[in-house]
Amino acid sequence: MPDNNKLGEGGQPMNFSQATRAANLDADRQLIKRYDQFQAKYVWLARITYAIGIGLLGLGVWLWQRDHGIWATVVGLLGLVVLLLGYMLGQGAGSGPYENGLLVPAIVTGTAPLTIAALANMQKDDSNEPVLWGVLKIEVNALPLHTKQVGEQVPCVALFSGDNKGYWAQLEPRPLSWATANEQVIHDAMTMIEPDEWRALNRLAPTLTALPPDVVHYYRADFTPVTL
């Protein structure tokens, strides 16, 4: 059974958002461990957050045993919130992003070092406001199943977080080829992404090389840059 039979369908809710077009990928965890450069960060952050949350719950129990009921409740609730945050961070590791992240276009923008730039609509909902594109350039350690040449199309899954005046503040793209060795999945993902999105990315291509990395840059529908 191919691992892209649900490619392009909606994803499951993840961190207070839900992708209308997800990869729904049957991800190869060994490939993720080998290539996904974000995974270690999320695992480390989740473990630290869980440790803090468990410590707060333990402190809450200690306060309760000493008849500090109000403080015990406050600290205990804070511990639960921290544990929820740890759970959300944990979703950023493993196969979750490749199953439920938004399918977005990216292209290779440089080869020394190897960089890609991904584009996504940064609106938080389906409002009728004009589209606001977000572009993020990142350096990648590896890009299997792709030729390392400028302009190469790289379908990615993206996670979003934060808020910037009603729009997403952060965009985190991950190439699908970090989680599958099936070249057909990559090809099919390219066709699932709207042609208008590929055209928008290609329209911005001349400016992408000069963009500083790891910073989301916003563009109106007419491709004029905007600062939020």
Image: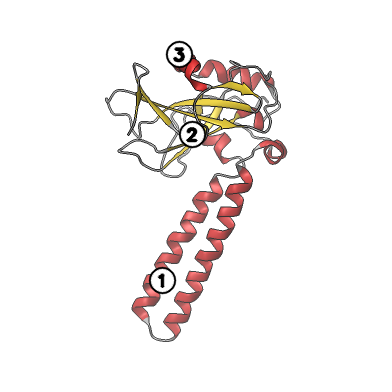
135 on left or right of 131: right
Q: Disc 2 marks which amino acid? A: Gly
In this rendering, the answer to whether 70 lies above or below 100 is below
Q: Which residue is mark 1?
A: 75
Q: Nearer the viewer, residue 166 or 126?
A: 166
Q: Nearer the viewer, residue 67 or 175?
A: 175
Please provide percent x and percent y for residue 91: 54, 46
Quarter the C terminus occupies: top left
Q: Which mark is residue 11?
A: 2
Please provide percent x and percent y for residue 89: 52, 50
Residue drawn at point x = 45 percent, y = 45 percent? 15
- The answer, for residue 6, to whether it is visible in the render is no
Q: Secondary structure at mark 2?
A: loop
Please provide percent x and percent y for residue 8: 51, 24
Q: Which residue is mark 3?
A: 203
Q: Nearer the viewer, residue 214 or 50?
A: 214
Q: Secondary structure at mark 1?
A: helix
Label 2 crowd (10 A; few <14 / some 14-19 / many >=20)? many
